[in-house]
Image (cartoon, rainbow, N blue to C red):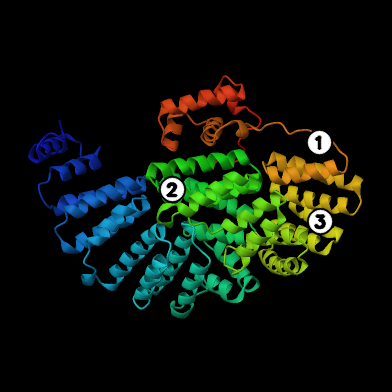
Amino acid sequence: MYRAASARERRLAHGALAEATDPTGAPDRRAWHRAEASAGPDDDIAAALERCASRARARGGVAAAAAFLERSVALSLDPERRIERTLAAAEAHFDAGTTDVTERLLATLETATLDDHRHARVDLLRGRTAFTRQRDDVGPMLMTRAALRLSALHPQQARDSFLDALEMSLTVGRGGGVIRKVVAVARSAAPASRSPDLLDALIELVTNGYSAAAPLLHRTLHGEHEPLWLRRPALASMIAIELWDPKTHSDIADWLVKDGRASGSPLLLRLGLAQKAIDAVMLGDLGQAIAATAEEAAIADAAGVPPLAHHRLHLAAQRGRREEFRKLAQEAENAPHGAGQVTNLHATTALLHNGLADYPAALAAARRATEHDDVFLTGSALPELIEAAVHCDDRAAATEALTSLTERTEAGGTTAGLGIAAYARGLVTGVEHHFQESIELLSTDRLAPYLGRAHLLYGEWLRRAGRRRDCREHLRTAHDLLSGAGSEGFAQRAVNELRATGERVRTRSEQPYEKLTMQEVAIARLVASGATSNELAGQLFISKRTVDAHLRTVFRKLGLTSRRQLKDHPDLLIHDRFT
């Protein structure tokens, strides 16, 4: 009836609804009906919609805020207010993930009439949308152009714009050369800051290396008044990984998921879930990694965009799933608008092949990952390069990579980084103490896959030294840790080594996440954490009926009959709740 009615009849209906709606109890609903009842521009109604948008954003309704602001643009009479509301609506639609509407709103602006500050905002938004749609350097160049426009007028905003370009590069899977280009422009053109800040730290990192930049990176990451990730989550997570600081990375991932849910920002929540998945892989909690990955994919599907690729590739590589990894890499490469461009592809390829003991392939991938010494891309590939090079008898490559890894991990100063560097040093030098030091350091962290690899490499070294009895203890420990973490390729390496010593290895029992689909794992984990079917339906963008159908399948596959049994299931217990 509504759609069949004339425009005049619909306006009359909305007018009646506005009159009948309590302005105190439901001001947003009343403002919307007033807007729909209006036959033309009305600045009073436009201002009311602007206030509605502010309230919607405060309660996490990013999409609602974008809709209120877009409607306020259409009702604005005052040209200045119309421009400001158009920019605000475009920004809100970008945050809501509707970048096509962002581009349409920006196209309505006459840029020749804008002042430098507003022109810079337009450049920033166009740059951000270009990042998500193109493979070339249009995005960062637009954003650096915005920074240059602001240099004379608003120096601090100019510096923030350079950081926007860097952070967006990382958020959408760009990096490396793009980051160096932006830093090069910032180094020559960014206004000076009152005291050294994040931009200075990144310039120092690119210009003078890790030893020079590490103190400032540590200081800016944790901040004097508030941590960096409250303002720059993507940059903060990359810096934490680059400093080999898994504890801080875990804190960032938790905050991203929490703030993404509270703010209603799909982009922020997807970034948080991706980082949560990587964090879970590093901790050896494959169930949680799969659950976070499934939820990110559900949000991406609801938004009509491809899921993020980097964490899914990392998960497949750690599990030693060659065919799954190949398929994901191909999907990422063929994703529309370059959305699947993945910064860590070569590093994760090296991880995959080392786990499968395909050392020539691992070495080739690690070389590609490190050949340009790209910021935020090289560090994680160095241990893989060293392990592959040693197995391929390329001592020169292993020694050179160890020098770089040692510089980075000593600058980071964390037990995780120092422990990984220690087992890499043991591989290169053949000194037993380095393996022992690695195990001692990594035992203080919760990084089961890395501790497992330390035991594996030490056990392999001992067996080749003819110390069959000594090696078995470490190889058994490696097998237990790696199989429990789902690192199937590395676990099989431990099995092969044990069999070479004449020891029989019991087949590992099947884990729950191997019986279930990715979405079933997500539902099982969330139900085990106490979520209701209605909460799950909203969180995973499916119907309650679909949730219940999946839950019945989970019960059948795991031999359970109730939610209580699922909650108490030993392999699904959640210690670090991320919901």
Q: Quadrant of residue 94?
A: bottom left
Is 11 located above or below residue 137 in the figure? above
Q: Position of residue 376 (x, y in %)?
A: 57, 63
Q: Position of residue 216 (x, y in %)?
A: 59, 69
Which of 222/13 is in front? 13
Q: Which residue is at a point 19% across and 52% down the rendered structure image? A: 46
Which of 113/255 is in front? 113
- Looking at the image, residue 133 sits to the left or right of residue 352; the answer is left
Q: Which residue is at a point 28% across and 60% down the rendered structure image? A: 87
Q: Earlier in the sequence, mark 2 or mark 3?
A: 2
Q: Position of residue 278 (x, y in %)?
A: 58, 49
Location of the N terminus (image quadrant) = top left
Q: CA distance from mark 2 to mark 3?
A: 42 Å
- Label 2: few (<14), some (14–19) or many (≥20) C-alpha neighbours in 10 Å: some
Give the number of the mark in front: 2 or 3: 2
Q: Earlier in the sequence, mark 3 or mark 1?
A: 3
Please tell me the numbered disc located at residue 579.
Answer: none
Is 527 located above or below residue 272 in the figure? above
The residue beneath circle 3 is 435
Q: Earlier in the sequence, mark 2 or mark 1?
A: 2
Q: CA distance from mark 3 to mark 1?
A: 24 Å
Which of 386/562 is in front? 386
- Label 2 residue SS: loop
| Amino acid at dot 3 | Phe
Please tell me the numbered disc located at residue 505.
Answer: 1
Q: Position of residue 326 (x, y in %)?
A: 57, 49
| Amino acid at dot 1 | Val
Q: Residue furthest bottom?
A: 188
- Label 3 residue SS: helix
| Amino acid at dot 2 | Pro
Judge whether residue 222 can be spotted in this image. Answer: no
The residue beneath circle 2 is 306
